[in-house]
Amino acid sequence: MIKAIRIHETGGPEVLKWEDVELAEPGEGEVRLKHSASGLNFIDCYQRSGLYPIDLPTTLGTEGAGTIEAVGPGVDNLKVGQRVAYAGGQMGSYSEARNISAGVLVPVPDGIEDQTAAAMMLKGMTVHMLMFKCYAVQPGDTILVHAAAGGVGSIMCQWANALGATVIGTVGSDEKAEKAKANGCHHPINYSTEDFAARVQEITDGKGVPVVYESIGKNTYEKSMDCLANFGTLVNFGNASGPIPAIEPLELMRKGSLALSRPTLFNYTADHDMRMKAAADLFDIVSSGKVKIEIGQTFALEDTAKAHVALESRQTMGSTVLIP
Amino acid sequence: MAALKASAILLREHGGPEVLKIEETEIGDPGPGEIRIKQTAIGINFSETHTRKRPGGTHSNPLPLILGREAAGIVEAIGPNVEGFEIGQRVAYGLRRQQGAYTECRLIPAFELVAIPDDISDETAAAIMVKGMTACYLVSQTFEVGPGHTVLVQAAAGGVGTILCQWAHHLGATVLGTISSPAKADHAKAHGCDHPINYREEDFSARARELTNGEGVDVVYDPIGAPTWEGSFKSLKRRGLMVNYGWAGGRVTELEPLDLMDMGSLTFTKTALYNYANTRENMLGLANALFDVVSSGAVKIEIGQKFAMKDASLAHEALETGKTVGSTVLIP
């Protein structure tokens, strides 16, 4: 018997229940993983609220790290006692332990702690997807990152710097602006006091940016489009203020033959080689020290509901980790 | 100097092909930055049938209006402050927003003109300027087509489609294309389309999946709009790109971002030549890349049908009823 945070119905943070769960022996191709840390992500909130439909009841959580406790039949690349991490694909990281398909696990290098791994897998691989696949950031590019002080934003600012890009980032407070700046955001914009679209035009001498990484959604997407140069890409990967409503295709043409991309990590990591490449690149950049993973706050796994409240009310900074 | 008389097709009211009538017009001397050209061949584009039918659209043009966006001809007179052109030179143009090509003779800003290489005929140049520059940005900028890619070209036997298929094929891609008749399938096949799909006989997206082992294509180039909208998205592989560059079959007014996500993290873009050829430098880049690929023989331009300029109405009718194959030109 182990403890896990489960939901039986969609709704607010109160639907997250701390419950006893039976854990069977790992099946064919599976291992049993004892979690030492689980990452908190916006996608968990979207699944909890019902925005992203999932089958119920279930254990939430898409990112975790821990130690292998038991190995099922047909698994030959992993062994008991090995430290591993994972992100995306199979939900269930809000638990003390779980069974999981061996194929999604990535061994964690010695220099990276479990909590750090749990804090960076989903967000870091998301950043990899955003900056290498959805739009390949080039040296000399100026890019716009929303929520630049958040979990994904903090990693993106640092990684973009390592790639030689100039980063404009929006944040919700002066405190977050300082934080973003410390992470390599060259031009933090406090969107609650400044018109970010006007500032982007000013910073880029009216040229606009080739890409906007848009995780806020409903409240910002129109202005985000106004920030784009011709053929720019609006990469919408989150909905912190609600999903972007239906847009008129012609608007994209009128604003400069723009592209709208709507990625989810799942579609970029379903392929084993792509997933391993993303994880390897991520571990490399973190090991090099060019990207530091800051755990802004930790919560006991039991208090996951409080963590959801904090994330949704924009009170968190950097990554948030749940500790079983 | 007295104004020149020139025949032109004037649109005085919106309507069916019959509203296209020939009239005598007067052409003045070229002003500063302008050139007067005597036109030898005029290209027809599908979007002109839309402009003919109804006012408004993307760029509203008041009546009376001379339709047409591309043509070739000879420099007849050069206005003040024009450099780089001489009388008698063969030139062509492909306009983005403006119209005015269905005419014997016209004034045009010199910055719109491109010198035609010797090995490309006037008719070919007239037929390819807008369509070819469009195909050029689609395969080289909107999506960089290369070996290993699989692309789906909607309206593969049409003006842009015929060029697009050949160019994508030349760049090493496997080309799937939709067509509406066996004759068009033959045409497409002879022009770089590896797998023509007759959409009247089979579900093109199902066929596209079948041809790609269930994976779907990397990119769809769609100038049709409403009738092909869903099928185009369904033909894409995970992380694929849907490019719409026209509404020949009707406009779509809504795109749900979350649908793109649910269909496999797709990207959508709606393109227009005026964004890609937004400066003279960019326009020349497209035009010269086009001339190069045509000169090399990798892209063959077939003038599927020629009409006398006075019969522009017949040309529009043929285009709208899907009876044309390849490019259509008017001869003044």
Image (cartoon, rainbow, N blue to C red):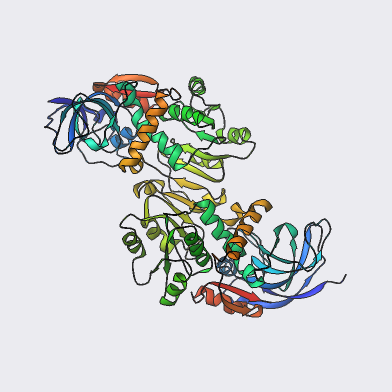
In the rendered image, which quarter contains the N terminus of chain B? bottom right
In the rendered image, residue A267, in percent from the top left (x then y), is placed at 34, 44
Q: Kindly tell me whether residue A181 is visible in this rendering.
A: yes
Q: Is residue B166 above or below residue A112?
A: below
Q: Is residue B277 left or right of residue A320?
A: right
In the rendered image, which quarter contains the C terminus of chain B? bottom right
Q: Is residue A216 above or below residue B329?
A: above
Residue nearest the observer in this picture, A260 or A250: A260
Q: Is residue A78 left or right of residue B231?
A: left
In the rendered image, residue A300, in percent from the top left (x then y), is placed at 26, 19
Q: Kindly tell me whether residue A219 is visible in this rendering.
A: no
In the rendered image, residue B106, in percent from the top left (x then y), is placed at 74, 68
Q: Is residue B198 left or right of residue A202?
A: left
Residue nearest the observer in this picture, B49 or A237: A237
Q: Residue at x 70, y 59 (%)?
A: B112
Report which quarter residue A74 is drawn in.
Answer: top left
In the rendered image, residue B61, in percent from the top left (x then y), is placed at 65, 62
Q: How many marks?
A: 0
Q: Residue at x 19, y 37 (%)?
A: A57
